[in-house]
Image (spheres, rainbow, N blue to C red):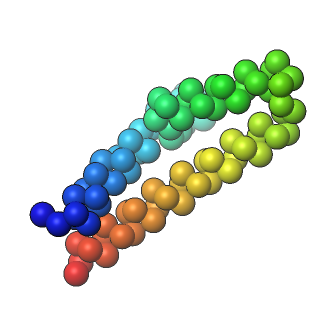
Amino acid sequence: MSTLTRHLSGSHETLNTYCRRVEIPMLGEVAVPPPDKVVYYAGLGVLAALQVIEWPMALVITAGHLLADQHMSGLVKGIGEALESA
């Protein structure tokens, strides 16, 4: 197994961690980030609540991280599919 193949198979496992979903009665199915990300977002919330950082800044940082995570998981999935079809 090549280094690239090992790296992509590990990335595929990482991709699966982003696919956790929880059924919420009024909202339906909601994606849940991995526990380490939840702790990070909670930390930002605590910093905003204690007014260490302004709440708009906490929202911008959180949105940026969510978008980056979605982009990376889609990128890894695309690379994996391309290599499977090759």
Extreme left residue here? 1
Quarter of the view holding residue 40: top right
Q: How many marks?
A: 0
Quadrant containing the C terminus is bottom left
Residue 18 falls in which quadrant of the image?
Answer: top left
* Residue at point 38%, 42% (across, down): 17
Task: Tell me what residue is drawn at x 39 percent, y 69 percent.
Answer: 78
Q: Position of residue 33 (x, y in %)?
A: 50, 37
Q: Position of residue 68 (x, y in %)?
A: 59, 55
Residue 25, horizontal then vertical, whole percent: 55, 28
The answer to whether 50 is drawn above or below residue 37 in the figure is above
Q: Is residue 8 above or below residue 46?
A: below
Instruction: State whether residue 76 appears in this view.
Output: yes
Q: Is residue 56 above or below residue 51?
A: below
- Residue shown at 54% from the left, 35% from the top: 37
Q: Does residue 16 appear left or right of residue 26 in this picture? A: left
Image location of residue 64, percent across then percent down: 68, 50
- Taking the image as shown, residue 50 lies to the left or right of residue 44, namely right
List the single residue furthest toward the front: 3
Task: Give the residue at the far top of this rendering.
Answer: 50
The residue lying toward the viewer, choosing from 80 and 51, is 51
Nearest the camera: 9 or 2?
2
Res 23 seen here = no
| Figure check: 75 above or below 68 | below
Name the one closer to the observer, 9 or 25.
9
At 61% across and 47% down in the image, what residue appears? Answer: 66
